Amino acid sequence: MASLRQIRQRMKSIHNIHEITKAMGMIASFRFKKAESRFTKSRNYFIEMERLVTNLSGAAGEGLNVNPLFEKRNIKKKALVVMTGDKGLCGAYNSNLLKMATLWLKDNAAFSPVIIPAAKVANDFFRRKHLPTILGYPEKAMADLALAKKMTQDLKTAFSGGQVDSIEILYAAYRAGTPGRPQIVPFLSLSYLTAQKTAQKEEAAEYIYEPDLNTVFISILSCYLEGKIYMTLLESLTSESSARMLAMTQATDNAEEVLDHLKLLRNKTRQATITRELSEIVAGANVLI
């Protein structure tokens, strides 16, 4: 059995860990609420934007073939944007994303796959594993519009320049009360928009265009792509904050459970020590008598 000194030392270290995880949980909770607020406020706007672009792509019809972003290519090279976190201590959030990215590389080995890492964890992982990458964004903690515009421009350039024939995005979709669910969504080419329009059975909306459909569509299309990257960044950040908050809450609860066990062990050890000392005193007194 451990001595009282050893038990007290362990209790002190567990108590320190408990205070750290509790403070980190409070910080993560604050950041989660802030990220969730940004995400929910922007989501409705983007949903309407996506619906508008889908309707316009249906109205444009054959004219979309002229736009290089709608080009249906014979896919020879695929790219995957992997949005992880910038830090750890968020449970299985990062590892789940990296596992899915590794599986994607194996499944698409015939298409010369490359990774576009977004965030520090993804950058470090793929560089350490010497896996094929292009571009790369070391941090995504801010998840602001400036980063979204830069990423959108880089991805459009890579696709239009023929570096890649298909771009997809891997991120953690936000689900309340969970650390997020990894999923892959298409980004370029935009041919999936016409497929969505074909699948819809609702009556097409009618619009009045000024000056003309092509000018309006190209302008909105640029905003849509930036909005999609921005929303994905926000959703990824919200899921990461949620995962970190849940992980720190669980760690704090575990620390409290360990402390309760150690308190019980300390009391039992102290009681055994007192009982032993009393027995020795009684035995010594009997010898004197």
Image (cartoon, rainbow, N blue to C red):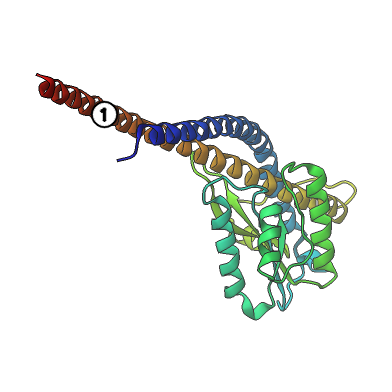
> Which is more toward the observer, 261 or 174?
261
At a point 70% along the width and 76% down the height, the residue shown is 75
Say left or right for 255 vs 66: left
At a point 58% along the width and 44% down the height, the residue shown is 239
Residue lying furthest bottom in this view?
A: 110
Residue 269, above or below 244? above
At a point 47% along the width and 31% down the height, the residue shown is 12
> Which is more toward the observer, 203 or 216?
216
- Does any portion of residue 135 appear in the rendered image? yes
Percent across and percent down for residue 229 are: 73, 51
Percent across and percent down for residue 47 are: 66, 44
Quadrant for the C terminus, please: top left
> Which is more toward the observer, 88 or 54?
88
At a point 53% along the width and 35% down the height, the residue shown is 21
Amino acid bearing label 1: Thr
Q: Residues within 10 Å of mark 1 (few under 14, many from 20)?
A: some
Percent across and percent down for residue 25 are: 55, 33
Percent across and percent down for residue 83 are: 66, 54
Residue 55, above or below 141? below
> Which is more toward the observer, 176 or 32?
32
Label 1 belongs to which residue?
273
- Does any portion of residue 205 appear in the rendered image? no
Quadrant for the N terminus, please: top left
